[in-house]
Amino acid sequence: MAKQITNHVQWVGKIDWQLRQFHGNEFSTHRGSSYNSYLVSGSEKTILIDTVWQPFDKEFVARLEETIDLSKIDAIVMNHNEVDHSGALPELLRKIPDTPVYCTKKGEAILRGMYHQDWNFVNVKTGDKLSLGDSSLTFIEATMLHWPDTMFSYFDGDGGILFSNDGFGQHFATESLYDDLQDLSELLYEAEKYYVNILNPYNMMAARKVKEILAMNLPLSLICPSHGVIWRNNISKIIECYQLWSSNYQRNQVTILYDTMWNSTRTMAEQIAAGIREVDQDVCVKLFNVANTDKNDILTEVARAKCVLVGSPTVNNGYTYAVAGILEMIRGLKFKNKKAAAFGSYGWGGEAVKMINAELQEAGFEILNEGLRCQWVPNQEAIEQARQFGKEIAKTINM
Ligand code: FEO
């Protein structure tokens, strides 16, 4: 059912309560998600901003038809064309084939590449306007936030509304669409997890875009992303969070990631944590077994850390499957301004520690030392070494 947001804006999206994985299996969505689509009506024109994911295309179009005669939609604005937002476009345009589709030049190329249709494309760039009569939309390119085609649209009616697509979004299903009707800590966690897992590689662009938008001094009563809640009472808070997360973000935290086969590497992880805490009682130390902890939650804890320690037993001359997976995701997210070290147990060979350090270095981390290895099961001496290793880490990261 459509939900009236302001005098001129209706929400016509889809809430996906049961979604638990997004981007295939790349992104966990413990709290579901939504694909937000908005109908904006001025005195002369009505436009639709974004659609929904393809599995909901028929439902979306049927519900839209209950809200408006589709022939009265004067234009469709596609802020970003990934399938979760453009998936219902083919179904909709089968019914209103000549309707102009406003998007960036890159957006047109992506839509053509995905749907192979010669739709009525209108390319727009930063500063271009679409008049709705008594109000208008202004387009703001937001390249690489997080795709080359991404743009935001600013509506100058109803006190000013920024339609930001993935920006400021969260995978968060709720029937009550506004930020102030949710548990704020849950919501901000999902916004942070979304930022880290989707936008972190593009930190510089995100920081610049937030600065650019603030410098425009636009009246802003709502930020309407295309996933999750509408920001109404916490606009400054989410903007501050974006400024924080996009600028070499870290807390006073050490994140210890490990995998273990027979608990030797786990024992090392726990003793290293104890050593850190002996030296520094103020630092937050968190341990995660990467084989049984959600990968996207782990990455959020990596983003928060000033130092990341990664441990794996040596198996088949390398590290474990789970450690390999998380190292690859860490590499891709391009974390900056973080220290790291490796550790792990072994029976013979013991190559894993050196290999993990090499991966972390390649990923841009400052490697603190050659790492710590322990053969077979830690005895009292190895336990002491692990504690000492933790103490040295604590001293180094506070220098
Ligand atoms: Fe929500 Fe990049 O699509």
Image (tube, rainbow, N blue to C red):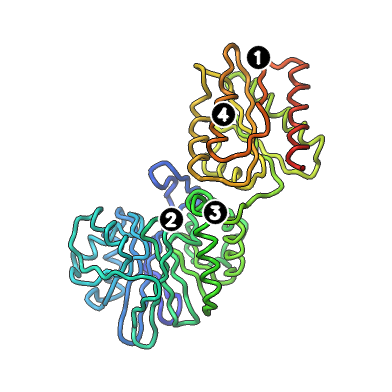
Q: CA distance from mark 2 to mark 1?
A: 44 Å
Horizontal and vertical percent position of residue 382: 74, 18
Q: Which kind of residue does numbered mark 2 sit on?
A: His
Is 342 placed left or right of 231 in the picture? Answer: right
Of labels 1 and 4, the one closer to you: 4
Q: Which kind of residue does numbered mark 1 sit on?
A: Gln
- Label whose residue precedes the other's in the sequence (3 or 1): 3
Of labels 4 and 3, the one closer to you: 4
Could you tell me if residue 10 is visible in this image? no
Q: Which kind of residue does numbered mark 3 sit on?
A: Glu
Q: Tell me the crowding category of disc 4: few under 14, some 14 to 19, or many 20 or more residues within 10 angstroms, Cα based.
A: many
Find numbered disc 1 in the image and state the secondary structure of the residue it sits on: strand
Disc 4 target residue: 356
Q: Which quadrant, please, contains the C terminus?
A: top right
Residue at figure coordinates x 79%, y 45% from the top left? 282
Q: Tell me the crowding category of disc 3: few under 14, some 14 to 19, or many 20 or more residues within 10 angstroms, Cα based.
A: many
Disc 2 target residue: 146
- Label whose residue precedes the other's in the sequence (4 or 3): 3
